[in-house]
Amino acid sequence: MDALWSNFVDFLSNKYFLLTLSFGFFFAATKLRKRTGWVLLNPLLVTTFLLIFYLKVTGVSYDAYQESGKLIDFWLKPTIVAMGVPIYLQLKSIRKQLVPIIASQLVGCLVGIVSATLVSMWMGAPNDVVISLAAKSVTTPIAMEVTQSVGGISSLTAVVVVFSGLLGAVFGFKWLAFSGVDMPISQGIAIGTASHALGTSAAIERSRNYGAYASMGLMLNGIFTALLTPTILRWMGLM
Amino acid sequence: MVKSFFIIFGCLALGELVVALTGIKFPSSIIGLILLTVSLQMGIFKVNQVKKLSDFLIDNISFFIVPPGVALMLYFDLIKDNLLAISVSVLFSTALVMIVTGYTHQALRRWGKKRNKLKNG
């Protein structure tokens, strides 16, 4: 009986089982959000929370989970490369209004990096936290790569990215209307720039065109942020 | 499908090579993304050779982020100690980025349209 029990405990950290859990939680969370329509039930957040809960309760170590986890996050880098396809497909419409798009993206990118780092610095956050917030506006995989390359904590970045995405998805259109931004293209681009894929999905719910503009903002800000973050952080004396 | 994997991993591997040779602090994946965009634009590859795989990867992006999210449990104390600074700065910065970006785009767009009208009219 004891042998059986200890085999069962070993099974709790079996890598196929842990992968199954990850798939299962994510699938269930996706269903749950669809049924309730509630943005806060973000599948990434729910799955992360359930997995951490599972590890804490069963005592399975973080390292044991990462054995199977690395098989999943291995696909992040190829996915970023794959974003070249939608960018290519949008090059034509970007070229039509090159100056407004590039200029607003650059401004948004700069404002995002500088404001997030300055405010958190003033509020007394330590350096590694401050650096991890710099890329919070862009899509998670890019943001995490940027944080990693400047020496921050990429899993903290993953969470604040989701946080800023949810904020934009929930309040974005209100903020924009309040500040007098009423052109659909400008609204879409602004939401994609500040709140990446989560904001974009909120924009798509309004209309497909909104979604296309938002994904343009999402892509370009991702590239600009990757290009500029190290330099800006160096200027600010943060690295 | 094998061809799509070859193209996407090829761009990524080239990005890795650039980072390894130059030692720059820049994600190899972004270099790969730029390489893929440029080679599609130059007609080296065709969209339909990578579209299926690219759609599949992009559609599942938030699942791939789950393991890094779980790593958060290693930083609970750090986050607890800085919760207020983190939340306030992210809230403030997200609103600011959105408003500034939207406003800049709208202003430049209106200015451009007005100039075109003057030129044509």
Image: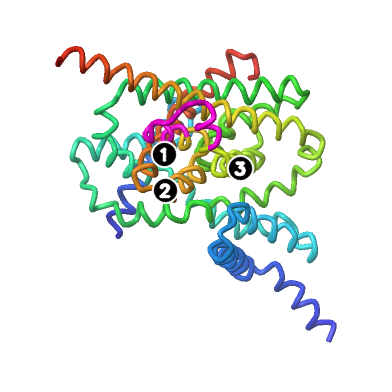
* Residue type (three-letter) at the residue carrying disc 2: Ile
Q: Considering only order in the chain, which callout, 3 or 1, is on the residue closer to the N terminus?
A: 3
Q: Give the class, few, some or many, for how many residues have Cα within 10 Å of label 1's Cα (few <14, many ≥20).
A: many
The subunit letter for the residue under badge 1 reads A
Total tally of numbered discs in the picture:
3
Q: Is residue B17 visible?
A: no
Residue B111 occupies which quadrant of the picture? top left
Distance in Å between CA atoms under marks 2 and 3: 23 Å
The subunit letter for the residue under badge 3 reads A
Q: Considering only order in the chain, which callout, 3 or 2, is on the residue closer to the N terminus?
A: 3
Residue at screen point 18% across, 40% down: B43
* Residue type (three-letter) at the residue carrying disc 1: Ala
Viewer-nearest of discs 1 and 3: 1
- The disc at residue A158 is 3
Q: Which residues are magenta?
A: A174-190
**x, y percent for residue B45:** 22, 45
Q: What secondary structure do most residues of the magenta stretch adopt?
A: helix
* Helix, strand or loop at mark 3: helix
Q: Quadrant of the N terminus of chain B?
A: bottom left
- The disc at residue A204 is 2
Viewer-nearest of discs 2 and 3: 2
Closer-to-camera residue (A34/A157): A34
* Helix, strand or loop at mark 2: helix
Residue A169 occupies which quadrant of the picture? top right
Mark 2 touches mark 1? (CB < 8 Å): yes
- Vertical arrangement, residue A198 with respect to residue A9, above or below: above
Residue at screen point 26% across, 28% down: A95
What residue sits right under mark 1 in the picture? A214
